[in-house]
Structures are given as C-alpha cells and as structure tokens.
Image (cartoon, rainbow, N blue to C red):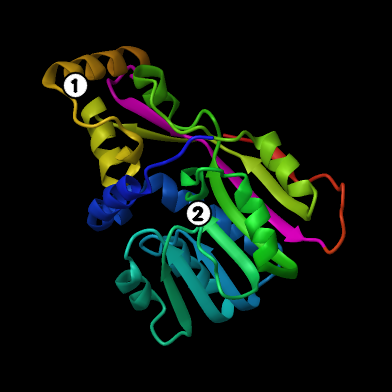
Amino acid sequence: MLTHNKDRICRCFSQALTTYDEQAQAQQQINRRLTDILLAQGARQFARLLEIGCGTGQLTRLLCAELQVEQWHLNDLCRTEPQIAEILHGQDYRFYCADAEHYTFPAQYDLIVSASAVQWFDDPLDFVTRSRALLKPDGYLLFSTFAPQNLAEIRALTSVGLNYPHLQQWQDALQKDFKVLHLQQQNIRLIFSSPLAVLQHLKATGVTAVGQGHWTKTQLQQFSQDYRHNFADSAGKVRLTYQPIFVLAQKQGEKTNDSANFICFGN
C-alpha cells in the first residue's frame, strides 16, 4: 500500500489556497455534477452532513444553496475554516482540521460527501468502510475520485501519478453494504496555451503534491518539447485530461448484491 506524505500534501494545497478557486476548472465541473446527482435523487433535507476534504468550500457552497442541513460537519487537512465560516455564516457547523483517513469523527451522519479528496488516502477503498461506520441506516454517500487514466498526459511523460482504483474496484467495495445509485466515469479535457500553463495550473490547484521536487531548466525544456509533440492540436494548444469517477450510494441494513442502478463511462 502506497503511503502519502500528508504534510507535503497539506503544504502544497495550503500554498494554492489563493489561486485554487480561479484555476480549478475541472473541480468546478465535478462539484456541480456531484450536486446534480444528489438532487436528482430527490434528497434535500438532512439532519447532519459530513464533508471530507472540503478545501475552500466549492462543493460546500453549492450544497448550502440547495440543501436544508441542520448541522454541518466539515473536514480538511488544511486550515480552511475561514473560507468555510464565510460560506456557512449563520449555520450550525463544526470544522475538523485533521487527516480524515485516521480521524475519529464524533457523530453519525445522514449524508457524507467528498469531492476529489479520497485519492490522497493511503487506502482509498477503505473510505467506503469508514463511511459505512459513520452513516446512519439509509444514509447517503456521495463522492468523487479519479480513475487510473487521470492526468494521463503527465503520467506518460514523467511516470509520476497516484495509484487510482478503477471503476470496478469501487463497485466491488460498495456492493457489500450499499445500494449503488449512481456510478459513473467521465473525461474532462482542459485546453491550455502551453505546457508551462499546464504546470502552472497544476501548481495553482495543489496537484504538485505528488511531484518529485524542482525541475532543472533542461528538464523543463524537454518536458515542454515532449508535451507539445504528443499532446498539441493543430493550433498549438495542449490538452490535459481529468478522469473523475462519481458515486452516490445508500447504506443498507442488510447485505445486498444489487448491481448499480446506473453505471456508465462517458466523455
């Protein structure tokens, strides 16, 4: 099992807090999609909600506008409570600055949500087991993570990337104790003016937490040359592909072997 340097992850994302919201175009699409998936289920009222990896509160803000929640519990590895306090002004909330993979949360929840966070866990699939223990009977689990070909362009040129579970692994992990209501894999392709702009985007969104330190000028020039050669279009623009997985599942009181109501691959 791969062990992540959580201090480095926290440092990289903390440094990106002021640029994250503007630069995180893919994450904005992911947060909107998660919200739409939940709303399509017809569930809007929850006594207690837990968000894992709330970050600057992009998903929090969307959910706050759509849901009626009596008490919010929010968690992040970084100290983002000031951003959350602004979003949830006047609401009853608790903030836990902690490593969610090892923290003992103090309550049972009707809804657990997480956007683009559990891939940083040492054991991402264990998130399902931990969520089951924290959910009330019939509680909902809504989250996004990424599939193995996420940021494939970067991995192809640097051999650097996270070890992402694939869609079937998530299905297998969920089906024992959950009814899977929605399981979807999608591609989100962003276009940039140059390979340097790609690197700046990754730094501005904290993704360099998986990197290998500073590059030399020669390494940077070689990366740019290789990136343009492999991933540029006829106009000279270059692409970067995110591959999110979306999950909505409901905790079951008894073992179920139900297949997902909706499983798809899409672009």
Q: Which residue is found at the position 76% from the left and 61% from the top? A: 251
Quarter where residue 90 is shown: bottom left
Q: Label 2 is placed on what type of residue?
A: Ala
The residue wearing badge 2 is 115
The residue wearing badge 1 is 220
Does 233 lie within the magenta span?
Answer: yes
Q: Label 1 is placed on what type of residue?
A: Leu
Percent position of residue 18, x then y: 23, 57
174 to 190, vertically: above or below: below
Quick check: 234 left or right of 67?
left
Does 23 lie within the magenta span?
Answer: no
The count of marks equals 2
Q: Are marks 2 and 1 in contact (CB under 8 Å)?
A: no
Foreground residue among 141 and 22: 141
158 to 248, vertically: above or below: above
**Circle 2 — which element?**
strand
Sequence-first tag of 2 and 1: 2
Q: Which residue is found at the position 68% from the left and 36% from the top? A: 169
Foreground residue among 42 and 220: 220
Percent position of residue 51, x then y: 52, 65
Question: What is the crowding at mark 1: few (fewer than 14 residues within 10 Å), some, or many (at least 20)?
Answer: some
Q: Please give the range of residues in magenta.
A: 232-252
**Circle 1 — which element?**
helix
Residue 194 seen in this snapshot: no
Percent position of residue 68, x then y: 58, 80
48 to 58, vertically: above or below: below
Q: Which residue is found at the position 45% from the left and 25% from the top? A: 152
224 to 174, vertically: above or below: above
